[in-house]
Amino acid sequence: MSNYNEPNKTGRFGQFGGMYVSETLMPLLIELDQAYSKIKKDKNFQKELKDLFNNYVGRPSPLFHAANISKYLNGPKVYFKRDELNHTGAHKINNCLGQILLAKKMGKTRIIAETGAGQHGVATATVCALFGLECHIYMGSKDIIRQKPNVFRMKLLGANIIPVESGSKSLKDAMNEALRDWIKNVRDTFYIIGSTAGPHPYPKMVRDFQSIIGIEARAQILVQEKKLPDFLIACVGGGSNAMGLFYPFLNDKKVSIIGVEAAGKGAKTNETAATMTSGTPGILHGSYSYVLQDSDGQIKEAHSISAGLDYPGVGPEHSHLKKSQRAKYFGITDKEALKAFQLCSKLEGIIPALEPSHALAYLFKAFKNKHKNKVVILNLCGRGDKDLFTAAKELGFDTDE
């Protein structure tokens, strides 16, 4: 990444990012940044992380040629980066392992996290079980209902689930409560943030741990196609799976980068989570980035069928990539995502999570009968087990039969 040096020392990606937090948290974030900068260069840390990636997570995840979808599109050759095959069923485990190792090096004994779709909660509970650390997960009560399988998994792994009843009772509110907890318990507590959002150094740190996705995909596509892809596509909520794929390709100007947001009932409606197509720059969760806000600067409630994309902000690096036009961002509705969820299942025998179903829907919409002889890598960042009840309800299937 020789030409791309974001963020700068103060955690800015262009004009975005920074540390907009209370005075109580500032020393903690500075300590975290210093500890992370030091540990990154530690060969033992890197060796331990690599060993866990290989033997616990099951990396490298395959790069699969989706031949049936490619044929259906009559356009580009499509590859799936299959991070849904990771242990715990999504990309979230990559970042959680990196952060738990850092927490242990810093002598922290209590772990907190927020979760929307539950995948980050499951991954956090998993690494806490592995390393024997106390685990508390904040989760919106709305998400607890729609992500029942993951809630049970977290409890089985020994985590304490704390329901959040404030606001929209989803990811934004869970993150608010987790930050409040951290302020009260700074001495022994480490906050594992699951996305490339939040105050510096989290957007950088999460991106770095997730960039294993793009590093592997780059090496794999060069073996399979003898060239770099023409397009990268990934869904974007807070943005960790997308930044993980995009980051190792940012200097490759010929590679087009596409992020797909959740437009909910429509990007122009009040029921959307398409932050970069419908939002404006503002401050949320300690960072300056694109957010959904009203004319008074109050954060609006987001909506998406996908709990993992149901967030009214986005990571600052994505905001910078949009502003600099290095990446383009598009919105996909709940209905379009549900159709793609079904189509991928039927065509490839792979049931995707509702999050990457948004990326798939954009692929079906924008690439049908176009971009022939081009190569696309789409990040299939999560599997659909957790969304079966939500999808069944929306599609009118009786799950009690």
Image (tube, rainbow, N blue to C red):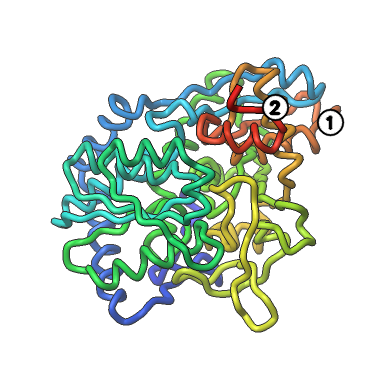
Residue at 82%, 21% (x, y): give it: 74
Quarter assignment of residue 18: bottom left
| Residue 353 x, y percent position in the rendering | 57, 34
Quarter assignment of residue 242: top right
Task: Work out whether residue 143 or residue 185 is closer to the camera in this orientation and state it.
Answer: 143
Q: In this view, does 193 lie above or below 377?
A: below
Q: In this view, does 44 lie above or below 317?
A: above
Q: What element carries label 2?
A: helix
Check disc 2 and give the amino acid type: Gln
Q: How busy is the neighbourhood of tag 2: few (under 14 within 10 Å), some, or many (20 plus)? A: some
**Residue 370: mark:** 1
Q: Is residue 19 above or below residue 379?
A: below
Check disc 1 and give the amino acid type: Lys
Residue at 51%, 50% (x, y): give it: 143
Residue topped by disc 2: 342
Quarter assignment of residue 122: top left
Between the C-alphas of marks 2 and 1, the distance is: 22 Å
